[in-house]
Amino acid sequence: MSRAAPLLALLLAGCMPAAWQQARALEGKYKVGSPGSGWVSVAPGGADHAWVHKAAGASLYTDSNCGTRFREARTQDLATELVAGLQGATQDLEVVQAIGPREGIVRTHTGRLDGMPVRLGIAVVNHDWCTYDFVLIAPLGQLDTLWPAYQAVLDGFDPVR
């Protein structure tokens, strides 16, 4: 039975629409800028890129999701999904901004994450079949200081094909 599972997976993959398979192959295939001094690259876990700034107690990550669900998704709705785990969330800012070759949405939120007060910077942009998320998590009072590093990551976004 264990030998059948890989064969079944291959058969199912062969039955998936080619467009879906091509879209999934785009995940993680993009460039971002460097956040610069003080930021250390760390294992991204389920994301594509991640950094921490130990002195500030902040983290920054980027992630991509590709497929038919993301082709027509509204960036505002996707940004709202990113703050679902933030308790007592209030939105402080929302602007439309160029992120790479497209316009995306950039927001800041204040709330509590695991009981700790934080501010989040969130950016979401769609490109072809993919949605790209950029998240900065900072202690209260640190977001403005760390914003240039976050902006450098956004400014370096390039959906390499």
Image (spheres, rainbow, N blue to C red):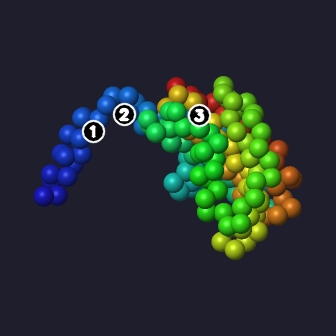
| Residue drawn at (55%, 51%) of the image | 47
For marks 2 and 1, the one nearer the N-term is 1
Q: Position of residue 145 (x, y in %)?
A: 86, 53
Relative side of 34 to 29, left or right: right
Per the image, the residue denoted by label 2 is 21
> Where is residue 5 shown, x and y percent of the image?
20, 52
Callouts 2 and 1 close, C-beta under 8 Å: yes
- Residue topped by disc 3: 126
Residue 98 vertical placement versus 80 (above, below): above
Q: Amino acid at mark 3?
A: Asn
Question: Closer to the observer: label 1 or label 3?
Answer: 3
For the question of whether residue 53 can be seen, the reply is no
Closest to the observer, 129 or 139? 129
> Residue at position x 38%, y 28% from top?
19
Disc 3 versus disc 2: nearer the observer = 3
- Res. 123 image quadrant: top right
Task: Report helix, strand or loop for mark 3.
Answer: strand
On the image, which quarter does residue 76 sit in? top right
Q: Residue furthest bottom?
A: 115
Number of the label disc, if any, that sits on residue 144: none
Q: Residue at x 70, y 48 (%)?
A: 122
The three-letter code of the residue at mark 2 reads: Gln
Number of the label disc, if any, that sits on residue 13: 1
Which one is earlier in the sequence, the residue at label 3 or at label 2? 2
Give the Cα separation between the discs numbered 2 and 1.
8 Å
Q: Amino acid at mark 1?
A: Ala
Q: Tell whether 96 sits left or right of 75.
A: right
**Residues at marks 3 and 2, CA–CA distance in whole angstroms:** 18 Å
Query: Which residue is located at x 46 percent, y 39 percent?
Result: 69
Look at the numbered disc 1 and give the secondary structure of its residue. Answer: helix
- Residue nearest the observer in this picture, 91 or 65: 91
